Image (cartoon, helix red, strand yellow):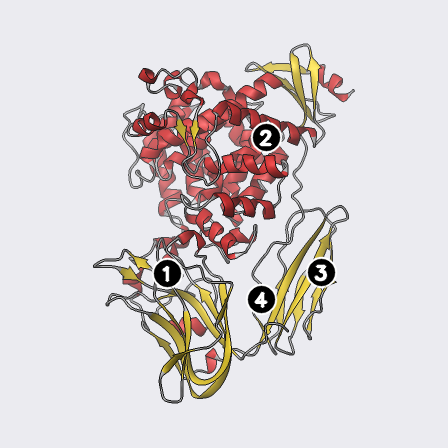
Amino acid sequence: MSWILCLLSTLILDGNLLVSSVQTQEKLLLKEAYEDKVYASWLGQCVGNIYGLPHENKYIDQPGQETFPYGYGPMLENLRQCNGAFSDDDTDLEYMDLAAMEKYGPEPSYEQMAGMWTHHIKTYIWIANRAALALMNFGYTPPVTGYSTLNPHWFQIDPQLVNEIWAVTAPGMVPYATGKSAWGASITNSGWGIEPTMHYGAMYAAAFFESDVRKLIDLGVAALPEGCRYAETVRKVESIYDQYPNDWRKGREEMARVFYHEEPVPTRTIWNANLNGACGILALLYGQGDFQKTLDYACAIGFDADNQAATLCGLLGVAKGTAAIPHDLLYPIPELGWKEPFNDFYKNRTREDLPDASLKDLARRTVLMGEKVMFSHGGALVQTPQGKTYRINSSAEYIAPLEIPSQPLPVLEVGKPVSFEIAHSGGIQPQKWALYTGIIPDGLRIVDGRLEGTPKKACVRPVEIALSDGSMTARRTLRLLVRTPNLAPTAEKVLARVEKNDLKKAAENTSRSLASYMAESVEAIRDGKLVGEGSCFNSYWNGPSGKDYFGYEWKEPQKIGLLGYHTGMMDGDAGWFRDLGVEYLNDQGQWKAVDELIIEPPLVEGPEPENKPHWVEYLLHFKGVSARGIRIIGEPMGHGDGEGRRSWISITELSVHGPIELGR
């Protein structure tokens, strides 16, 4: 048997049974060691997350003071109240991911993950994660929820703090862990925004067999795509450390200069994935494998510090086991008399419909999922002289489920050529597309996953398409809506409560990274530009509260029955309509509400930002009218409800079309 051949080259490294064979690409890991390392990853992430919370986003222009160790500080009271550890965004999504693996198997689909997100996440979610959740609540599924054309936070830190579990359940399986981490990161991010997550995934998987942090960093870089941005970032951080090995403050200053102050404005935020990844590498290097030192450096180096602290402590937990975690970090309140680390208790305070848990049980359940991953990719549990041992196929690769996500479709207009690539993910090559049911609108065709042609007639046609790779088949119904030509460009006048913005002042109302999207004139709502620089008009209003509106007026009456309202940039708790209606200008010059209004999909009312997506289109159908003017109108959601309230609507486009029968 191949595993017997592997035993001939057995090595003992840091107390872990490690076996390597060039011929078989197999590794052996004692079951007892794996269980300890998985438990240590949960403990380490809880330590780092809770310890780091007081330092989150606190040190930007300057690092924290070198008053090490920092200790838990104000978080001690939270630990006391919970009588154990508690959830935060560095561990709670992984808790949810574990539940997803238990429900659907160790390799869930994006569709299944979207269901988990919309069911279990109602609040306590931010930036890229929040934008992705809002898109899921709108009806889209990953990976389009991470696309830069839909998620303006595609480059932020979010995925690198919530995806460690995909690698913890793939010990030694570096290619698999890297690919699965990229898959997980793509739920919320894209482009170079997923690369630090891939690096962490590779390091976590490698850490089951390697404890030297410099070697782990290099193994992670080797797993990244050639020429990618983050590989260059890691090499630069290593060179900074080598230049200032005994001066972490100087190293931090240089790192911040390169990756924060010199970052292009559109992506220059304190939550930038590349920047915070650089912070993590720097802390890992200065910590030199020591748990406490790495933890304090992760906090002191700053930016979104609790995330680096959690991920690095989890990594060192995997590399060195539970014995490496200082006792006082696991038992920080002696008078409570805990018998187990964190009283063996994990208080879920952030995720809906998931119970509190035992940390030991979370580790046990994670090990079971790890076994499923190992065994389904050529691994096995065998008996060796040292005890029960996992035989691991370290060269296994991750093949994501083949899927056609629910996704935005192109704006189809009569007489307007279109060439649109239908989003899909996973599977293996070659892949074959087919029309499964339905009739494509006249003038259009689907060729190799592209919708092409020039529509000839306004209509609504649902079609079901299929994609197969020989072993898996994915299907998706696309509702193809062909509209009459857009009347907005022909209007004599654009109607709006606010027609121009002072961009300098407007930038003060939003984050620096998003300011570049803003347009000065309301004319932007009919320029055809849906995303990018200058695409978004925000109707900043300093007057008394009241309804906001956008629309058009023509010299001659127009036949109208459909509007396309494209949302702009949601900003915290503002940017959307509290309610929404459509009015037309009648023959007497009065604004009247249209009849039989249908908003598709329904507009979600209320203040919750988790269901207010960026850059999506709402279709407003109504009984056709002949009118010289048309507008959407509603109460804007704003910051606060009292004096000084700032409110606005963020919009990228408002198109106007003739009536379309929805049943056809």
- Of the image marks 1 and 3, the number of the one nearer the N terminus: 3
Q: Quick one: which residue is furthest to the front in this view? A: 596
- Residue 415 image-quadrant placement: bottom right
- Assign a secondary structure to mark 2: loop
Which residue lies under the disc numbered 4? 410
| Mark 3 to mark 2 CA distance (whole Å) | 36 Å
Instruction: Name which of mark 3 and mark 2 comes first in the sequence.
Output: 2
Q: Is mark 3 on a helix, strand or loop?
A: loop
Mark toward the viewer: 3 or 4: 4
Nearer the viewer's eye, disc 4 or disc 1? 1
Q: How crowded is mark 2: few (under 14 residues within 10 Å), some or many (20 or more)?
A: many
Give the Cα separation between the discs numbered 4 and 1.
24 Å
Q: Which amino acid does label 4 sit on?
A: Pro
Q: Where is residue 42 in the image (x, y as percent from the top left)?
A: 48, 27
User: Gap in Å between the C-alphas at discs 4 and 2?
Assistant: 39 Å
Whole-percent x, y for residue 306 in the image: 38, 34
| Residue matched to label 1 | 575
Which numbered disc, 2 or 1, marks the residue that appears first in the sequence?
2
Determine whether 284 is above or below 107 in the image.
above
Which label sits on residue 448? 3
